[in-house]
Image (tube, rainbow, N blue to C red):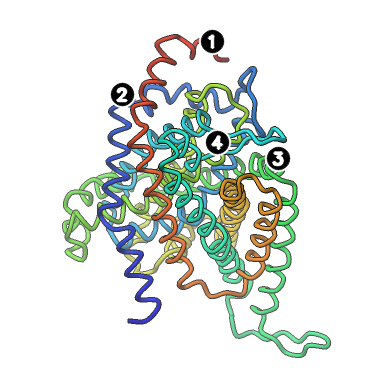
Amino acid sequence: MGFSEFLKTVENFVWGIPLLVIIVAGGVLLTVRLRGIQIRRLNLALKWMFTKEEGATGNVSSFGALCTALSATIGTGNIVGVATAICLGGPGALFWLFIAGLLGLATKYAEGMLAIKYRETAPDGHTYGGPFCYIEKGMGKKWRWLAKTFAVCGTCAAILGIGTFTQVNSISTAILDFCCPDKTKMWSLPFVGDVTATSVVTVIIAVSLTTCVAMVLLGGIQRISNVASFVVPFMAVTYIVFSFILVFANMREIPQAFATVIKGAFDPASVTGGAIGSIFIAMQHGISKGVFSNEAGLGSAPIAAAAARAKEPVRQGLVTMNGAFITNIICLMTGLVLVTTDAWQTGLEGYSVTRYAFTEGMPFFNADIVSFILSMSLVFFAFTTIIGWDYYAESCVEYLSNGNQKAVKISKYVYILAVFIGAFMTVKDVWTIANIFNGVMALPNMIALFALSGIVAKDTKEFFAQGKHKLQK
């Protein structure tokens, strides 16, 4: 067995049925104990997303913390991940992806609520927290080893995979596909001689991207939040509107598309012609990509939530819940684009099948313009994921080093270096490694959510019973 095959075996084990069952069961448990809070209180969640809480303390606004979390969540998984799920599991995978996303709202609420309840305040006044804090403070110090396990895996996932190499590679691929479709084209440069166009563009991408990332990250969480608060809403709205135009252009196909998704969820063979004949396969790919896309249960979002300028844990929990709601909309729009255009049946994979869907589904737009907009969406999605995951890495290192700011600063420079290196790497195995670390992150976090679900339910019930939500602006 080669190294790649070994990694794939480990990934399949980590992200096997047991972990998916645990994450989905956690969403079901929290949905029941919180009495469907993701539906009943969605109006409050959307309202509080844009309003400030009086008397609150923290590093950034609630909206800024949400955008920081979204910057790390909205990424290639919302474009490439959804396409992969539908191509491998059939259109029915979109139904199960939506169900996983709906349950994930309750999980995200609990994570955000616990993040504020158990966060730490450093000597200089800044706040930080996440699963490592609510595991140790909520479950007790005897569980510190579990908190440290999460923090170590979070650091590794950020620096060695999902935050750097994989995202940089996605940016490079998108730009190179648009700028250098002819990979064999040669350019002649002074003092260098003949080089391939792709190598020149790759160097430009590496230098430009590293510079932009460094300018943001060296400004700390305030600058990360400010950039995320501007870029995330812009890119999310642009992509959703662009997707809506395509779906509207194919309006006649929408009823059939929904029928295909529902039918494919429970009888895949009838839709795929027998190529995919198992409900289990549709469920597995839909649920796994749903979890990967909105990160509900992974424990990443509460790290950003802990930095929010917030006082009431329940309120911030609802604001954090919006992250899963927005990513679910993006995933749903991507899925509808793929199904309405029948792009999932072309035999293409990943980004290529999504690009095909957009270019073929919008014939009234120039194909190059459509390809450019989609490429730029992917670039911005990946860029914001880079800056968001850096903050996750820093917070994990801060916890592991007992607040040593020198260690935090070193981790930041290592992260920036990894971004530069990532442009020149082949990341065939890095995605697999990142997924493994993500899975190992999720397990400690889900254990904590099960253990603390009673506290989440109790505090939530008291908040609304006492009418505190009516006092909030």
Residue 350: x %, y % from top left: 43, 64
Q: Position of residue 175 (x, y in %)?
A: 61, 66
Q: Is there a contact, CB below 8 Å, between mark 3 and mark 2? A: no
At label 2, the amino acid type is Arg
Which residue is at 54% across, 23% downward? Answer: 48
Mark 3–mark 4 distance (CA, rounded to whole Å): 13 Å
Gap between marks 2 and 1 measured at Cα:
22 Å
Amino acid bearing label 1: Leu
Q: In the rendered view, does 207 fall on the left or right side of 277?
A: right
What distance separates the C-alpha of mark 3 from that of mark 2? 35 Å
The quarter of the picture where the C terminus appears is top right
| Residue 171 visible (yes or no) | yes
Which residue: 67% across, 45% down?
224
Disc 3 marks a residue whose amino acid type is Gln
Q: Secondary structure at mark 3?
A: helix
- Pointer 3 with pointer 4, Cβ within 8 A: no
Outermost residue on the bottom side: it is 193
Determine which of the numbered discs, if any, sits on residue 471 in the image. 1
Q: Residue 222 has which mark? A: 3
Task: Kindly state the secondary structure of the residue where label 2 is placed.
Answer: loop
First-in-chain label (3 vs 4): 3
| Distance between the alpha carbons at the discs numbered 1 and 4 | 22 Å
Q: Amino acid at mark 4?
A: Ala
Q: Residue at x 56, y 61 (%)?
A: 167
Q: Are marks 2 and 4 in contact (CB under 8 Å)?
A: no
Q: Say which residue label 2 marks.
A: 35
Task: Say which element carries label 1.
Answer: helix
Work out whether residue 332 or residue 303 is closer to the camera in this orientation and state it.
303
Of 320 and 398, the residue lying toward us: 398
